[in-house]
Each structure stands twice: as C-alpha cells, then as structure tokens.
Amino acid sequence: APWRETKCNKYNAGYARNFPVAVNDECVQPWWNREGGIMRSLLALMFAVLAAPAWADDRETYNRRAAAADAALLQQLDRDRDGRLSREEARGDLNLGPRFDDMDVNRDGIVTREELKSYLQQTYGVVPS
C-alpha cells in the first residue's frame, strides 16, 4: 500500500515505514514508541544515571585545562616578563583581551598573578599551581 497521510504518521515517520499505519482506524505504534510506555522512561533514567559521572568528569577536566591555558596565555603575552599583564600587552589577543576587565579586579590596567588566580578560581573553580 502506498504511504498515506493519516493521524498515525507522527508515530511511524521516523522509524520503519513498513509498520501498518492503521488497524481499525487506530494507530499501531512500535513497542519502543508507545506513549506512556515504561521503556522510554527506563531508557531516559538509564542514560541520566550513566552519563552524570562522565559529564562531571568531563567538566572538571575542561575547567582544569581552561585554567591552565589562561595561565599559560598570561605568561605568553607578558612581553616584558615582569609577571604582570598590562592592557597594552593583552590588546589584540582575541582570547584574553575581551576578558581583561573581568580579570583586572582593582581596575588599574594591570592583571597580576593574584588577580589571575582569583579570576580562575571564580570562573573555573580551579587554582593553578
């Protein structure tokens, strides 16, 4: 039978089209797609339980790497090697430049190592060594 547009197509369109579209004018859904079915709830619960620890580890790893990258970038951009980053040294860097004012807590135009540590702790929850 050719594909017919019926009220049942919302259940069958994304799966296999060889399911009967209607039986006695009622929708026939595959067992994994029944509304209110326990299978969908169990799969969602299983995914949430299994993915939560992995997501937390990935987030923690990302935060540590991002904090280390910001600390390394400060050292790289510090042209005069005084351990501080001036606004002029940060100008032109697309990564650190826009965040300079967030890092410069006392608004003196210079980011010190202490200000950077404070920023990294606040932003990533990590204190670089």
Image: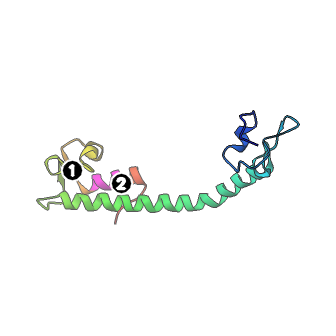
User: Disc 1 designates what residue?
Assistant: 93
Percent from the top left, x then y, of residue 89? 15, 51
Which residue type carries mark 1?
A: Asp
Packing grade of label 2 (10 A; few <14, some 14-19, many >=20) is many
Which residue is nearer to you in this view: 11 or 17? 17
For the C terminus, the quadrant is bottom left
- Residue 104 visible somewhere in the drawing: no
Q: Residue at x 75, y 54 (%)?
A: 42
Reading the image, the residue beneath label 2 is 120
User: Residue drawn 76% across and 51% down?
Assistant: 32
Q: Is residue 115 in the magenta section?
A: yes
Asked if residue 41 lies left or right of residue 54, the reply is right
Count of numbered marks: 2
Numbered disc 1: secondary structure: loop
**Magenta residues?**
114-119
For disc 1, the neighbor class at 10 Å (few under 14, some 14 to 19, many from 20) is: few
Please name the predominant secondary structure of the magenta segment in the image.
helix
Helix, strand or loop status at disc 2: helix
- Residue 97, can we see it? yes
Q: Residue at x 80, y 51 (%)?
A: 31
Q: Quadrant of residue 65?
A: bottom left
Taking the image as shown, residue 74 lies to the left or right of residue 31, namely left
Tell me residue 64's x, y (percent): 40, 62
Foreground: 108 or 96? Answer: 96
Work out which residue is located at the far right of the displayed protein and give it: 24
Q: Give residue 6's position: percent from left, percent from top.
A: 74, 33
